[in-house]
Image (tube, grey):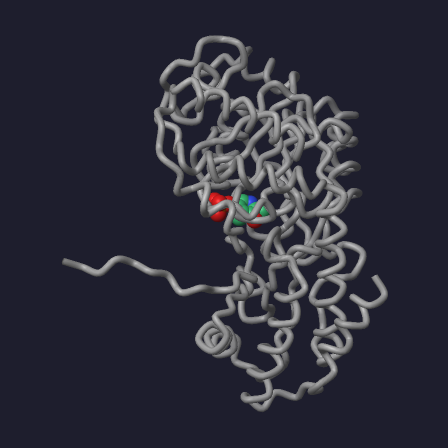
Amino acid sequence: MTDAFHPPLRTLMGPGPSDVPPQVLEALGRPTIGHLDPQFVALMDDIKRLLQFVFQTQNELTLPISAPGSAGMEAAFVNLIEPGDTVIVCQNGVFGGRMKENVERCGATAVMVQDAWGEAVSIDKVRAAFAEHNNVKALAFVHAETSTGARSDAQTLAEIARENNALVIMDTVTGLAGIPVEVDAWGIDCAYSGTQKCLSCTPGIAPITFSKKAQDVIANRTTKVQSWFLDMQLIMGYWGGNTKRAYHHTAPVNAMYALHESLRLVEAEGLANSFARHALNHRALVAGLEAMGLSMAVSEDIRLPQLNAVNIPEGVDDAAVRSALLSKFDLEIGAGLGALAGKTWRIGLMGFSSKGVNVRKCLLALETVLNEMGADITSGAAIPAAEAIYANQ
Ligand SMILES: *Cc1c(COP(=O)(O)O)cnc(C)c1O
């Protein structure tokens, strides 16, 4: 017989998953009940309320999809987009490219607005794209580009889409609970997220919300949603409001306990406090990294506090550093993706991972490993620089 699997106790400071609080892990281990049990149905109602709270929306169609963030992305496109539609897709990193894939697999045309990796989506380019194309069904963009650490101006992008009668599809997988996300105030028609980033739940669930306008678009489709599993009309039979809940698929019951607990913790902390905590730990980390002589890859005004892209110093072996951090410090940081592979590290400070002890651990570990590799850095300055931020908070 094979041995039970016991994972090491890592500190997760990559692009997700983030550290999961013990309360959430404990919730996951509670007794499984039926997915139509009246008590589970009551839990579903509370999960919906809490999701409305974190998304800052009154949207009736707000629910967790039983699959990872990528399924949230797919659910947004397959439900709202039909063959022959035109969608303006903004790409400034990995995930905009996946949106393009989704649009094209729906039989629609993706008009691409390209920006350099590490930049925000250009407002001017989006305006120009709308000026050039008629009958645009939707504008799709990534609020918090996890591949680069850049934040885009979701509110202004949504405004432009609304002026052009287009739906707004927003990926806020990494944004949610780390920086303000105001679905109703910004006029977002569909926003989706994932549980393993700033919600600090276990991976595998995708919270999603659709506006009334988006719901009408889905109800008035002329073609069937090509995905049976992600068809909102069918899912609503199970997650829908007042109707009797009917079997669609078996909800991941225990994962829903975990999601509920993680959302409860966000509510208990308060969104404003959570954003302030993410911002503070980000400033301390950046101060420490810069004192060490490292530089950030994204300009200050658009940096995501929860995803810190750092330039890898000349001559330093990217993979060797990450593997030393993992083996010597049980510390995971992320590699660069796509155009930034080998050029940046991505240090996550998401959700429960965003805390002073992690900032200090990461700075000490990185300094130690870089020194061992003979990198040209300043020793002994990082922690005092971070402490100065904490002292002046
Ligand atoms: C992580 C992430 C996804 C995908 O989520 P998975 O849970 O890995 O499927 C999509 N978009 C963004 C911006 C992400 O950071």
* Residue drawn at (58%, 35%) of the image: 192
Residue furthest top in the image? 243
Q: Quadrant of residue 31?
A: top left
Q: Is residue 59 visible?
A: yes
* Residue drawn at (64%, 36%) of the image: 170
Q: Quadrant of the C terminus?
A: bottom right
Q: Quadrant of residue 85?
A: top right
Q: Position of residue 80 (x, y in %)?
A: 55, 24
Residue furthest bottom in the image? 374
Residue 221 left/right relative to 347? left
* Residue drawn at (60%, 37%) of the image: 264
Q: Position of residue 222 (x, y in %)?
A: 50, 12
Q: Nearer the viewer, residue 40 or 58?
A: 40
Disc count in the image? 0
Residue 77 left/right relative to 156? left
- Identify whether 115 is placed above or below 61: below
Residue 71 left/right relative to 152? left
